[in-house]
Image (spheres, rainbow, N blue to C red):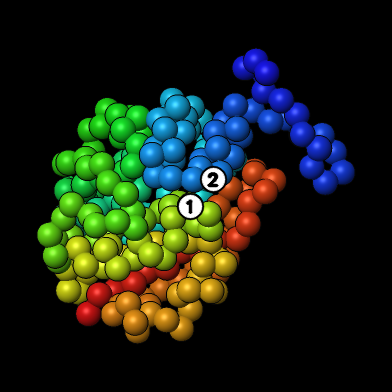
């Protein structure tokens, strides 16, 4: 099809399928980190417009939890799975001066780099060894990344490793991941639960959205 997109029958009616919808499906259907990176590279120019149209909530909620649990000026912070820099932009505005970005997609990071809010940008794969020393960050934010069929809780040990003792991790994750893998299992990860939201839809304008939640954790 052309840039007009295509249509699909969902539920009881026809809905338009845009190129951005196709990108979203491609990202979640990818079978390897390289394939995920390639699809995000292709999507980088249209990503923020699509997320605005579907009412994307994770950046606002993650930023609010950071403001609640991390003192203004805490540094450095890691924006893990930074994408185009939606979270980093807001964290910078509310008083966190030194933020580093990590993402799998060079194309998405090029958009983030242009915003001028990151002290450094790193390419890396969540779930693999990260390019940071132990206990490096005062806080870690991972918003919109931990979800079924994409990046799971296997990413958490590395994020915790590079967080300072006393540091805070703010995560958004699909409710199914919380129920199946985290609820009741935080002791094994050597973190304590500070805060959690009730379940919410991360993209209320996306017909296929399923509930997520955001949590704040502290590393002893």
Note whether 9 is above or below 65 in the view shown.
above
On the image, the x and y values in percent for residue 174 come to 53, 61
User: Front-most of 189 and 112?
Assistant: 189
Q: Which comes sooner in the sequence, label 1 or label 2?
A: 2
Q: Residue 115 shows which numbered tag?
A: none
Tell me what residue is drawn at x 19 percent, y 63 percent. Answer: 162
Left or right of 128 on screen, residue 35: right
Q: CA distance from mark 1 to mark 2?
A: 6 Å
Residue reaching furthest to the top: 2
Tell me what residue is drawn at x 22 percent, y 80 percent. Answer: 220
Residue 112 appears in the rendering: no
Residue 135 appears in the rendering: yes
Looking at the rendered image, the quarter that the N terminus falls into is top right
On the image, the x and y values in percent for residue 11 come to 82, 46
The reply to whether callout 1 and callout 2 are in contact (CB within 8 Å) is: yes
Left or right of 43 on screen, residue 109: left
Note whether 196 is above or below 46 in the view shown.
below
Residue for badge 1: 150
Left or right of 163 on screen, residue 150: right
Which quarter of the figure has residue 168? bottom left
On the image, the x and y values in percent for residue 86 come to 38, 41
Instruction: Report how many numbered discs are placed on residues in the image.
Output: 2
Other-residue count near label 1 (Cα within 10 Å), few / some / many at <14 / 14–19 / ≥20 = some
Other-residue count near label 2 (Cα within 10 Å), few / some / many at <14 / 14–19 / ≥20 = some
User: Front-most of 100 and 28?
Assistant: 28
Q: Residue 28 shows which numbered tag?
A: 2
Judging from the image, what secondary structure is the residue with disc 1 in?
A: loop
Tell me what residue is drawn at x 38 percent, y 80 percent. Answer: 186
Tell me what residue is drawn at x 18 percent, y 60 percent. Answer: 137
Judging from the image, what secondary structure is the residue with disc 2 in?
A: helix
Residue reaching furthest to the front: 31
Left or right of 95 on screen, residue 86: right
């Amino acid at each position: 099809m052309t840039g007009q997109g295509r249509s699909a029958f969902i539920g009881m009616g026809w809905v338009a399928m845009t190129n951005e919808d196709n990108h979203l499906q491609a990202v979640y259907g990818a079978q390897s980190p390289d394939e995920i990176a390639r699809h995000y590279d292709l999507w980088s120019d249209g990503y923020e417009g699509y997320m605005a149209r579907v009412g994307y909530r994770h950046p606002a909620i993650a930023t609010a939890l950071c403001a609640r649990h991390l003192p203004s000026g805490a540094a450095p912070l890691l924006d893990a799975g930074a994408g185009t820099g939606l979270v980093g932009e807001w964290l910078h505005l509310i008083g966190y001066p030194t933020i580093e970005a990590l993402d799998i997609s060079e194309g998405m990071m090029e958009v983030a780099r242009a915003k001028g809010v990151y002290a450094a940008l790193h390419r890396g794969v969540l779930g693999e060894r990260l390019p940071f020393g132990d206990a490096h960050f005062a806080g870690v934010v991972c918003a919109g990344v931990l979800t079924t069929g994409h990046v799971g809780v296997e990413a958490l040990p590395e994020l915790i490793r590079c967080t300072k003792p006393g540091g805070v991790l703010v995560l958004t994750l699909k409710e199914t991941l919380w129920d199946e893998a985290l609820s009741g299992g935080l002791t094994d990860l050597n973190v304590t639960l500070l805060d959690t939201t009730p379940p919410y839809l991360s993209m209320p304008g996306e017909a296929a959205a399923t509930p997520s939640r955001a949590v704040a954790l502290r590393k002893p």
